[in-house]
Amino acid sequence: MLQEGRGTFECDGEKWPVSRAGVFTERATALLLPSGRTLTVRADTPLEAILISAPAPDGGTPVLVRADDVQPATRGRDTFTREVHNVFVTDTHAKRLLVGETFNPPGNWSSYPPHKHDGRDGEPVLEEVYHYRIDPPQGFGVQMLYAGDGESITHTVRDGDAVLLPYGYHPVSAPPGYRLYYLWGMAGAERRLALHEDPAHSWINKLKT
């Protein structure tokens, strides 16, 4: 997943020129490679790209998603409105990975009402990682992780941080004055995005605005 910069992705002799001014400026450009392939990245400018991988069966062909292929969707409402960009979610190319980007306006929550996908309530088991960017970059965000048995951890996340989310509910908050972005990648035995919301907080979906 390209974060910013200009260069070339190359695999098995095939080349793709790529560029992105930044995650808050342009939609995603991302390359999906089948298992066992070698990726070469050549940078024409300072370039940052994030690699997300998971074991998968062999076979398939490389697929490049460009900015025009990404369709934003608004989720939530009020102070938990956020914009979600699915990159590899509903496609038929990826075999295990689910990848996308979420954008929190200043002061807003996402992954809210709190949800999980650890299989403890019958939903598919998906491990997840978030990679954060903050605008302006001196800001921060708040990443919670809690489980039904009372376990609870809160991380202060800053520009460039990553948080592993192996289980539990994991809501995110952006403080006033700072836009918050996170690249999310999930993988599991079953490639299906079916979330389990915390029943203690799902009532907020029924509020009338």
Image (tube, rainbow, N blue to C red):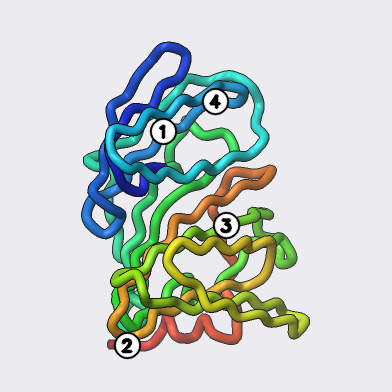
Q: Report the residue at 32% width, 85% height from top.
A: 176
Q: Are marks 1 and 3 in contact (CB under 8 Å)?
A: no
Give the SS element for disc 2: loop
Mark 1 is surrounded, within 10 Å at the Cα level, by few (under 14), some (14 to 19) or many (20 or more) other residues, namely some
Q: Position of residue 184 (x, y in %)?
A: 49, 55
Q: Which residue is mark 2?
A: 208
Residue 61, label in figure: none
Q: Are marks 2 and 3 in contact (CB under 8 Å)?
A: no
Q: Report the residue at 38% width, 38% height from top.
A: 30
Q: Position of residue 112 (x, y in %)?
A: 47, 75
Q: Are marks 2 and 4 in contact (CB under 8 Å)?
A: no
Q: Amino acid at mark 2?
A: Lys
Number of labelled discs?
4
Q: Amino acid at mark 1?
A: Leu
Residue 31, label in figure: 1
Q: Which residue is mark 3?
A: 129
Q: Position of residue 18 (x, y in %)?
A: 29, 33
**Disc 2 versus disc 3: nearer the observer:** 3
Mark 4 is surrounded, within 10 Å at the Cα level, by few (under 14), some (14 to 19) or many (20 or more) other residues, namely some
| Left or right placement of residue 192 versus residue 207 in this view | right
Q: Amino acid at mark 4?
A: Pro
Q: Amino acid at mark 3?
A: Val
**Disc 2 versus disc 4: nearer the observer:** 4
Q: Report the residue at 54% width, 25% height from top.
A: 34
- In the orientation shown, which residue stands out farthest toward the right? 149
Q: Which residue is mark 4?
A: 34
Mark 2 is surrounded, within 10 Å at the Cα level, by few (under 14), some (14 to 19) or many (20 or more) other residues, namely few
Q: Report the residue at 36% width, 74% height from top.
A: 138
Please report whichever mark, 2 or 1, sits nearer to the chain's N-terminal start: 1
